[in-house]
Image (tube, rainbow, N blue to C red):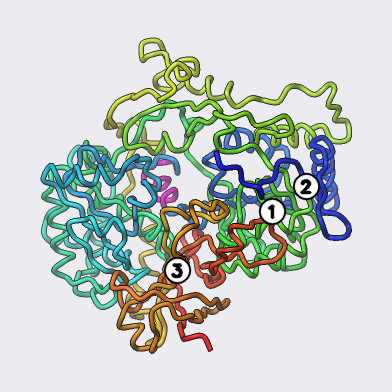
Amino acid sequence: MYEDPDRLRRPLRRTTAGGWEEVSWEVALDEVAAGLRQVQGRHGDDAVAWYAGNPSVHNSGTQLAAPGFLRALGSRSLFSASSVDQLPHHFAAWQLYGHPLLLPVPDLDRTDFWLILGGNPLVSNGSLMSAPDVAKRLRAIRERGGRVVVIDPRRTETAARADEHHFIRPGTDVFLLLAMVQVLYAEKLVNPGRVGEFTDGIPELGAAVAGFTPESVAAVTGVAPAVVRALARELAAAKRAVVYGRIGVSTQEFGGLCLWLINALNLLTGHLDEPGGYMLPTPALDVLGKPGPYRRHARYHSRVRGLTEFMGELPVAALAEEILTPGEGQLLALVTSCGNPVLSTPNGRQLDTALAGLEFMVSIDIYLNETTRHAHYILPPATGLETAHYDVSFHALAIRNTSRYAEPLFDKGPDARYDWQIFEGLRQRLEAGPAYDPATAAPPDDPAAKIDLGLRYGPYGRPEHGGLNLDKLRENPHGIDLGALQPRLPAALRTENQRIPLAAPLFLADLERARQVLAAGPEAAPDQLLLIGRRELRSNNSWMHNLPRLLKGRNRCTLQISPPDAAARQLTEGQLVRVRSRVGEVQVPVEITEALMPGVASLPHGYGHQRPGTRLAVARAHPGASLNDLTDETRLDALTGNAALSAVPVWVVGAE
């Protein structure tokens, strides 16, 4: 195993001189808990914010222990990477099926037609869709006579291997989807099958989309009406088909409507909850919680812009302004877990400025990076192959029902602490207050016990269903195959009447916003390009950028543009260019490629390692430029609160 010399092993405390010193775990946990209590004692519980980064869901210790810490913290000022990534998926699941974690996935092993919008599963290996070896599965679809079609502003790695690829102007997927739904109704192709027996609102949806013809949206999307009609007809005619959308559709100003319409297309063509279509996994460990209607929405709002809470969180696009804006309710302290929001959230420079002014900040992280450099304490957990792991979230998104528990492969060392030990240590101190005594404190809750209990009470835990438990998983270190996905509706629905409200009022209301945008026409001015992100296989997040093996080779942090756009700006391959948006400017080499739609520019996310005060030797040698120094915190999906990181208008000129 490669040992990263920059990885932290012991807690760091900021010194009065602005440097860092190592302290013991007991001292660090005592002082962190005291610091959090002091801020809350002076300014209230909500003055301390929480941010969870993407790796949090890849660590079962964090997933199972962090909630206890947050209950002890008692703050409503909670943020996470979900609102720069996937809130529209959860919002659509909540509105249609009654719970934000009832997320259907493509049944890839049995489908014959796979339509992909804004996703690149060959690189992501399936995002919100756990699917090992997507390349093999994509090839298998074609070998059995099926087809794969990709809709994307960039000819991605997945698009290059698909049967068909069509460019679409960034941020306009909602209009393509509306037009496809309109074609189904206009040509009498709606046939939901048995799911129609427990679905309401099918006629109402038809009336709502009547004006969105393929011809009416073509000028905005850039997709020919004939293509739209052919896609709708092929989807309706296919015996086993599925529509799948991912990051490109969820990170735009109509992400919520996009995911609603993707679910609607699958339902209206009879491919929801059917083999080869859009199906719900049956995970061995239930992630839904107690039965009953889900009501964690709009219970409170952000202080400055009045943004809506969903799933117990506020949109992270509001985090910086909540720190920077003085007055009652101002955020004055922050705890981050496994996250680097300075590089991963919109207008990262604004957040960078905000973090520098916090009264108190704590980061649970293995690196001194662009975000944690602002912390007063850094608590580094054991990670990777040093930890036990159960995929709490990703088994619930698997294209085949499986269950696996991984034991640690390497010893974490005597001075290290597991993530769950850190959270439990803080929880106990916050709950006990000054009376906390390590000599009498109860042993921390081991997540393995929670996993075992969840398995025993899960759908495979009863003896007649196999008696699955943690011991059985330990006896099968490669995991247990629990079978292909099975139809689960309507029994799995969490809606109050156990029916699907296809024409949900919140979606129908948001259609008026879409009509207004369609009437206004294309967003970018003639001299602007629309900026999109992209994912690189070896550097799909900032936390992978300090590993030499993943960063070696050519510079992959380039601004991709099309040949016509390069010629119009008199740019040559490799030339340094200035990219400017409303919020900032970066300089980056240009890469001219026919893989990009004219009018579009693409920059990978996760770079921007030039900031001082970090300990990331490899990353600093390959700094690149941060996409989120250009994205705009004021651009978000008004329905769901997800940041609109895609389709940001930018100016591109040669650097002087």
Q: Which sits in the foreground, 106 or 212? A: 106
Q: Tell me how far mark 2 sits from mark 1, CA to CA.
A: 9 Å
Instruction: Name the side, left or right, on which 152 lies relative to 237.
Output: right
Decide which of tag 3 and tag 2 comes sooner along the chain.
2
Residue 321 appears in which quarter of the rendering? bottom right
Q: Secondary structure at mark 3?
A: strand
Report the residue at 49% width, 33% height from top: 392
Q: Which mark is residue 12?
A: 2
Is mark 2 in CB contact (under 8 Å) with mark 1? Answer: yes
Quarter residue 205 falls in: bottom left
Asked if labels 1 and 3 touch by Cβ distance under 8 angstroms, the answer is: no
Residue at 70 percent of width and 26 percent of height: 444
* Disc 2, SS: strand
Category of crowding for the residue at label 1, using alpha-carbon neighbours closer than 10 angstroms: few (below 14), some (14–19), many (at least 20): many
Q: Which residues are magenta?
A: 89-98
**First in sequence: mark 3 vs mark 1:** 1
The quadrant holding residue 342 is: bottom right
User: Which residue is the site of mark 1?
Assistant: 368
Q: Label 3 sits on what residue type?
A: Leu
- Image coordinates of residue 136 in percent, x first then y, are 25, 43
- In the drawing, does residue 172 fall left or right of residue 436? left
Residue drawn where x is 38% and y is 40% of the image: 130
**Disc 2 residue type (three-letter):** Leu
- List the residue tagged with mark 3: 603
Between 234 and 348, the one lying in front of the other is 348
Eyeballing the image, is 59 above or below 615? above
Kindly identify which numbered label has been placed on residue 20.
none
Query: How far from the left and from the top, in percent, is residue 656?
Result: 53, 89
Secondary structure at badge 1 equals: loop
Type of amino acid under label 1: Leu
Name the residue: 36% across, 70% down.
Answer: 170
